[in-house]
Image (tube, helix red, strand yellow):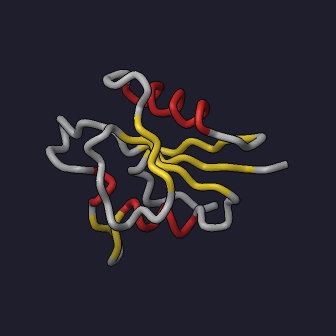
Amino acid sequence: MKFEAVILCGGKSRRMGRDKAQLPWRGRTFLTHLLEELSEYEELLSSADHTFVSDAVPHCVVADIHPGCGPMGGIHAALCFCQSDALLALSCDLPLFRS
């Protein structure tokens, strides 16, 4: 079986007021932590709207097919792009995640 993971980074951060993926945590960002934890997956994606830009993302960023649909829109876009047998979808704000 081939496994793929997607990090959902497309939120508008209305309540937080800033990009949650870039929040600092233990000397790195939430996103950097997840990238390291998921490094053993065969494929790694990020789902985001067209405005998401980060030097920390060395993999494919999948734009939402239906913008404004929240996390389900990001999961839908990732599933449409995914070529694997299974897809793990994670929010970008999970600093305690361990693979």
Q: Viewed as shown, does residue 59 lie left or right of 3?
A: left
The quarter holding residue 44 reads bottom right
Residue in the picture at 46% in, 33% down: 74
Which percent across, then down, holds residue 45?
A: 53, 50
Q: Viewed as shown, does residue 2 lie left or right of 65?
A: right
Which percent across, then down, holds residue 40?
A: 67, 66
Residue in the picture at 64% in, 40% down: 82
Residue in the picture at 46% in, 42% down: 62
The quarter holding residue 91 reads top left
Which percent across, then down, holds residue 55?
A: 33, 66
Q: Nearer the viewer, residue 16 or 74?
A: 74
**Extreme residue in the right direction:** 1
* Figure check: 75 above or below 91: above
Which percent across, then down, holds residue 85?
A: 78, 40
Count all numbered tags in the image, as a single digit: 0
Q: Viewed as shown, does residue 10 lie left or right of 12?
A: right
Q: Viewed as shown, does residue 20 lie left or right of 87?
A: left
**Extreme residue in the bottom direction:** 27
The quadrant the C terminus occupies is bottom right
* Figure check: 13 above or below 98: above
Q: Nearer the viewer, residue 67 or 5?
A: 67
Residue in the picture at 28% in, 59% down: 22
